[in-house]
Image (cartoon, coloured by chain):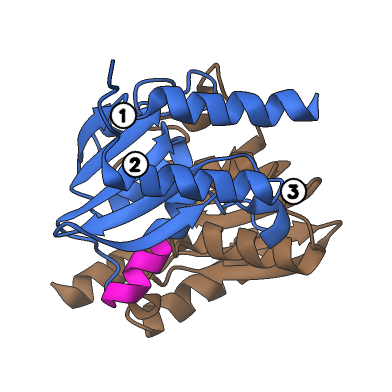
Chain colours: A brown, B blue
Amino acid sequence: MTRWPLPEYMQIALAQAKEAADSGEVPIGAVVVKEGRPIATGRNGPRERCDPTSHAEIEAIREAARVLGNERLEGCELWVTLEPCAMCAGAIVHARIARLYYGASDPKGGAVEHGARVFEQEQCLHRPEVYSGIGETESAELLRGFFRERR
Amino acid sequence: MTRWPLPEYMQIALAQAKEAADSGEVPIGAVVVKEGRPIATGRNGPRERCDPTSHAEIEAIREAARVLGNERLEGCELWVTLEPCAMCAGAIVHARIARLYYGASDPKGGAVEHGARVFEQEQCLHRPEVYSGIGETESAELLRGFFRERR
């Protein structure tokens, strides 16, 4: 049996997640894609960067905005290995991300299909298209392995 | 009649908001206070910084974490002129802010007493004490003046 290959962008996000784990950070990775081209990557790094906002999505969004010289990432996609939290979902709205693709869902901290459900709020000014479950097995296995080693 | 003076920290946050307006940014300001001492300020600046995450709270929290050399701002207070949005409320949770004081409430974008109500979610890992309505007149007047000039 041949397993259907993961989309290239989720592979990039997963590679970022692995890099986070190698640095002792919770393995979550992200990439911003514009017109089929990856323009910025990010990985979770709050401890080493002494920055509680240093989530993969925030890092990738901030880098993409620097690269484009624009706070609005119109027409951009964000690929991330885990369902974004409320902070990151809010940042996705502010950045006007057009499409969000994520791997594993996160009942504990996610705010897309759980908890605060940021994009479903009536006041939400911008709603990205959302696609989930891409590389969820790989993403979840990275997280489980990380926490298993630390127990 | 003598109007009760605003707490010093809200005055600092309002001064930051005025600085934002002077730079052409929506006037919102914040300050992080630890043991009675202001340790970091922040103001809204997404346009000039090309950073959609550059809200007053995020800037103040990131600077405070740098100053303390710790991603967790245990025992710290955050004073901000406007009700935080979902992104900033999420950052307040991640930073473990002990007490949140804000000025005007924000039915359009706020996520504390409106919309996503981030701190009220069952999954919320850390809930700050919240005090609102401090300097709300001054804060709202700054915002109204800013948008009036731009119409």
Q: Residue at x 37, y 43 (%)?
A: B11
Say which residue label 3 marks.
Answer: A72
Mark-to-mark CA distance, 1 and 2 = 7 Å
Residue found at the far front of this picture:
B1
The residue lying toward the viewer, choosing from B91 and A151, is: B91
Task: Kindly identify which residue carries mark 1.
Answer: B134
**Side (left or right) of A93 relative to B69:** right
**Residue drawn at (41%, 64%) of the image:** B62
Disc 1 crowd, CA 10 A, few/some/many (<14, 14-19, 20+): many
Name the kind of residue labelled 2 in the image. Answer: Met
Earlier along the polypeptide chain: callout 1 or callout 2?
2
Query: Pointer 3 indicates a residue of which chain?
Result: A
Image position, residue B139 (x, y; %): 47, 30
Numbered disc 1: secondary structure? loop
Image quadrant assignment for residue A105: top left
Numbered range of the magenta stretch? B62-69
**Residue A148 x/y as whole percent:** 21, 70
Task: Please say whether residue A110 is visible from this viewpoint.
Answer: no
Q: Nearer the viewer, mark 2 or mark 3?
A: 2
Kind of residue at disc 1: Ile
Q: Chain of mark 1?
A: B
- Can you tell which of label 1 and label 3 is closer to the viewer? 1
Which quadrant does the N terminus of chain B fall into? top left
Residue that carries the numbered disc 2 in the rendered image: B10
What's the distance in space between the residues labelled 1 and 3, CA to CA?
32 Å
